[in-house]
Image (cartoon, grey):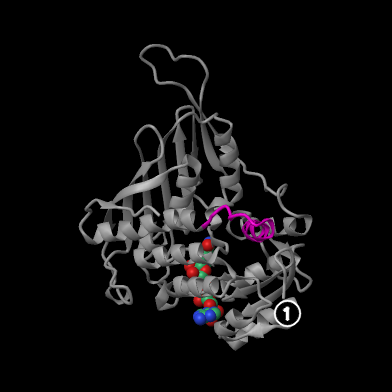
Amino acid sequence: MATDDQLTIAVVGLGFGAAFVPIYQSHPSVAEVVICDPDRGRLDAVGAEHGIARRLTDYDEVLADESITAVHLVTPMPIHAEQSIAALAAGKHCACAVPMGMSVREVEAVHAAQRASGRNYMMMETAVYTREFLHLKEITDTGDLGAVQLLRGAHYSNYENWPAWKWYPPMLYATHALAPLLAISGTRVASVRCLGSGRMPARFTEPYGNPFPSETAIFELTGLPYPLAAEVTRTIFATVRQELESFDVYGERLGFEWSRVRGRPGLLHRLEAGAPEHGRHPTVITEELESPDRTESLPADLQPFVRSITGPDGRRRGGGHGGSHPHLVHEFVESIVAGRPPAIDARISAAWTLPGICAHESALAGGAEIPVPQL
Ligand SMILES: NC(=O)c1ccc[n+]([C@@H]2O[C@H](COP(=O)([O-])OP(=O)(O)OC[C@H]3O[C@@H](n4cnc5c(N)ncnc54)[C@H](O)[C@@H]3O)[C@@H](O)[C@H]2O)c1
């Protein structure tokens, strides 16, 4: 049986999940990587590419295998909660792709399962390990921003050509736009008001009965000694825009805006020192903010995965989602080895998932204020 300082990890679901396989294989505290996917073709392709012997088609085999210390679920969203609960109940640590669940009941059940098991649960939120987020966090931690005054997040995508399980209500997958705002400001969401927007093509309303191509929410935040709100927009259908995950944070002395064009540097707005002349606007200096790779906290073998690298077969690997993947893997693995909760534990995962679920409920109720359960 594997010990907690030399882990055997099962990566479950090998679409996006395949990107994590070589990162776990490179981690010094991982002894073996097992892969699981009911799609035999995908399983064998990933197994052959990375030289993996143990390939399982049935998740129940993962659960029953005592040599497996932890699972990383990268499976369809509708089964995240049930698979997480099953992993924790089987005594395994569990990492799961966003979101934690699709209903308040599911999120509460995963949270309860983590507490009952005493094992680690981590929602693998890429948006709080991008190089841009890590850079801004460093700036805000110095206090240079002053008080946070206004927050705005957006995630524009289009899942019309994906399997029908991805045709979810936009706010059910809002964590990439919301989590950075909550993490930077150190706040939680108390309540939400949200409106749906646009004309929904009828064929996308199933399987979730969602009538909205896009949703815009105002989240009322709590945790600071003054009022704070965050505005978040999420589009998934029939709304033309280059795909983008972004967040903006405005403080008393600095403001940061993610570039509206993918791949371009963000903007930093800085208040010029000294009082402006009476009757004039304060001078704001705006400059592009290049965010460097953040590798210093990673083991040497994981550092190359922050950027995409070319493998021996000439294919590009790694580097996705702002270089976040190796950081997520390292945090999950290290939390298990150190016997501490991960940075995004069950309580934080719930605090980042529930507001989107409540936002969609608000949109269905014509923008009614919905309180967000606090776990
Ligand atoms: N930035 C991010 O955090 C990010 C990016 C992409 C996808 N995701 C999330 O990752 C998850 C997977 O998305 P994807 O794009 O890879 O989807 P996908 O459909 O390409 O892949 C899902 C895989 O899971 C497998 N699968 C289905 N049922 C399974 C089961 N019971 N047990 C094991 N495997 C099973 C499928 O065969 C498939 O290979 C989703 O929840 C998605 O939202 C997150």
Q: Can residue 238 be seen in this view?
A: no
Nearer-the-camera pick, 340 or 26 = 340
Residue 354: x percent and y percent? 38, 58
Ligand 1 is within 8 Å of the C-beta of the residue at disc 1:
no
User: What is the number of callouts on the image?
Assistant: 1
Residue 259: x percent and y percent? 51, 46
Disc 1: CA contacts within 10 A as few (<14), some (14-19) or many (>=20): some
Instruction: Examine the structure image and report whether residue 331 is included in the region drawn in magenta.
Output: yes
Q: Describe residue 70's horizontal placement relative to residue 170 as left or right.
A: right
Nearer-the-camera pick, 332 or 16 = 332
Q: Describe residue 78's horizontal placement relative to residue 323 as left or right.
A: left
Residue 88: x percent and y percent? 54, 70
Q: Mark 1 points at which residue?
A: 52
Q: Is residue 50 visible?
A: yes
Residue for point 73% across, 55% down:
303
Nearer-the-camera pick, 321 or 368 = 368
Amino acid beneath label 1: Ile
Dominant secondary structure of the magenta stretch? helix
Query: What's the magenta region?
Result: 328-345
Quadrant of the frame with the N terminus: bottom right
Which corner quadrant of the image does residue 281 belong to?
top left
Q: Describe residue 263's horizontal placement relative to residue 301 as left or right.
A: left
Quadrant of the frame with the C terminus: bottom left
Residue for point 67% across, 48% down:
293
Instruction: Examine the structure image and report whether residue 107 is included in the region drawn in magenta.
Output: no
SS type, badge 1: loop
Residue 248: x percent and y percent? 46, 42
Residue for point 58% across, 58% down:
321
126 over 315 or under it: above or below: above
